[in-house]
Image: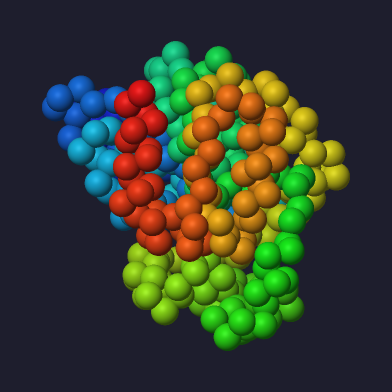
C-alpha cells in the first residue's frame, strides 16, 4: 500500500473539516494479503488506545486494525468549547468524518470498549447504513444507570480503597485524575492482584489529562436527561455482538441486557469470573469470539 494512503501502517492525522479539529489514528497490521478492516474505538474520557492495541494485537493476524483517538485524547485536539465533548452528540460524529476521510462507503466492522463502545453504538444508531458489523465490549448504555453490583462489593478488601476514591474524590486537576487512574483500576477486575500489574504497564509514560474526563462527563449529563441512546437502539441495523463480564463493576451487565432488548437480533456473550476488561481476564475467549463473529 502506498505510503501516502490513509490506511498504510503507522500513525496518521487529519483535519475534521466540520470543526477544524485534528484527529489522530493508528493503523496496525500487515495489509499485503488484503485483510478486512476493523475499527477499534477507545473511550473518550482520555484513556487512549494503547491498552487496546496491546490486548487486541493478535487480531492483526486476521484484520487491519484502526484505532481512532477521540477529540482531546492523545494527538487529537480538543474543542475550545468543553461542552462539545459528548459521547453521542460529538464523538460519534467524528466517526462519520473519519469514514469519509478513509474513502469508505461503510465500516465493515467496528468495535468499542467501555465508553468506546458507547461511541460506536451511538454512531451505529445515527448512521445505520454505515456499519456492517458492530461489537460492543463492556459498554455503557448512556442514560442507563445501575450500581447495585458495585455497592454489593464495595466493602470487599479487593475494592475498598478503589471504591472510596471512585465515589468520594472529585477530579478538578490533572493530579486528581492521575490519582484516580492509580486507585480506581482494581474495580476493573475480578482478580486485581493478577491482572492489575499488566493493565497498569500499558499506561506507563502516557500523559494523563483531566480535560477529557471532566468535559465528557459534563457533556453527557444532558444525554442522561434525555436518553437518546436507549431510544434509538431500534435504529441499529448492523449485525451486533455484545461481550460482557458477569462481575463488571464499572459498566454492569444490565447495560448488555438492556441493549439486547433494544437490538433483539444481537448476540450476547457473558463471561463468568470476569470484570470490565475481558480482553485480559478472558483473553483467549474474547479473541476467539471476536474472530468467530467477524468471520461468520
What residue is rendered at 64% in x and 28% in y?
Answer: 263
Between 104 and 55, the residue placed more toward the observer is: 55
Quadrant in the picture for residue 251: bottom right
- Please indicate whether residue 151 sits to the left or right of residue 286 in the image: right
- Please indicate whether residue 146 sits to the left or right of residue 55 in the image: right
Looking at the image, residue 227 lies above or below residue 44: above
Report the quarter where the N terminus lies: top left
Residue 153, percent from left and from top? 65, 74
What residue is rendered at 53% in x and 22% in y?
Answer: 238
Between 220 and 151, the residue placed more toward the observer is: 151
- Please indicate whether residue 122 sits to the left or right of residue 186 in the image: right
Asked whether the viewer can see residue 289, the reply is yes
What residue is rendered at 75% in x and 47% in y?
Answer: 144
Of all residues shown, which one is farthest toward the right? 225
Looking at the image, residue 91 lies above or below residue 45: above
Report the quarter where the C terminus lies: top left
Quadrant in the picture for residue 147: bottom right
Asked whether the viewer can see residue 181, the reply is no
Looking at the image, residue 141 lies above or below residue 15: below
Residue 193, percent from left and from top? 42, 79
Quadrant in the picture for residue 92: top right
What residue is rendered at 23% in x and 26% in y?
Answer: 35
Between 20 and 129, the residue placed more toward the observer is: 129
- Please indicate whether residue 142 sits to the left or right of residue 212 in the image: right
Of all residues shown, which one is farthest toward the left? 32
Amino acid at each position: 500500500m502506498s505510503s501516502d494512503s490513509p490506511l498504510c501502517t503507522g500513525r496518521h492525522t487529519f483535519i475534521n473539516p466540520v470543526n477544524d479539529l485534528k484527529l489522530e489514528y493508528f493503523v496496525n497490521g500487515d495489509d499485503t494479503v488484503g485483510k478486512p478492516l476493523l475499527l477499534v474505538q477507545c473511550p473518550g474520557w482520555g484513556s487512549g488506545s494503547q491498552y487496546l492495541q496491546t490486548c487486541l494485537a493478535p487480531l492483526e493476524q486476521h484484520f487491519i486494525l484502526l484505532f481512532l483517538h477521540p477529540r482531546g485524547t492523545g494527538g487529537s485536539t480538543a474543542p475550545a468549547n468543553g461542552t462539545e465533548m459528548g459521547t453521542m452528540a460529538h464523538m460519534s460524529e467524528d466517526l462519520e468524518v473519519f469514514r469519509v476521510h478513509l474513502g469508505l462507503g461503510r465500516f465493515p466492522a467496528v468495535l468499542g470498549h467501555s465508553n468506546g463502545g458507547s461511541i460506536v453504538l451511538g454512531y451505529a444508531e445515527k448512521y445505520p447504513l454505515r456499519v456492517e458489523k458492530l461489537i460492543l465490549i463492556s459498554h455503557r448504555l448512556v442514560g442507563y444507570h445501575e450500581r447495585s453490583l458495585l455497592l454489593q462489593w464495595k466493602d470487599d478488601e479487593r475494592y475498598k480503597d478503589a471504591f472510596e476514591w471512585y465515589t468520594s474524590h472529585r477530579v478538578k486537576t490533572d493530579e486528581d485524575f492521575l490519582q484516580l487512574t492509580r486507585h480506581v483500576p482494581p474495580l476493573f477486575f475480578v482478580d486485581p492482584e493478577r491482572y492489575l500489574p499488566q493493565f497498569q504497564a500499558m499506561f506507563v509514560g502516557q500523559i494523563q489529562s483531566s480535560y477529557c474526563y471532566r468535559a465528557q462527563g459534563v457533556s453527557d449529563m444532558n444525554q442522561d436527561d434525555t436518553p437518546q441512546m436507549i431510544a434509538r437502539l431500534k435504529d441499529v441495523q448492523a449485525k451486533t455482538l455484545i461481550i460482557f463480564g458477569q462481575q463488571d463493576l464499572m459498566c454492569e451487565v444490565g447495560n448488555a441486557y438492556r441493549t439486547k432488548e433494544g437490538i433483539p437480533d444481537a448476540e450476547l456473550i457473558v463471561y463468568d469470573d470476569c470484570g470490565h476488561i475481558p480482553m485480559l481476564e478472558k483473553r483467549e475467549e474474547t479473541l476467539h469470539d471476536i474472530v468467530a463473529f467477524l468471520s461468520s
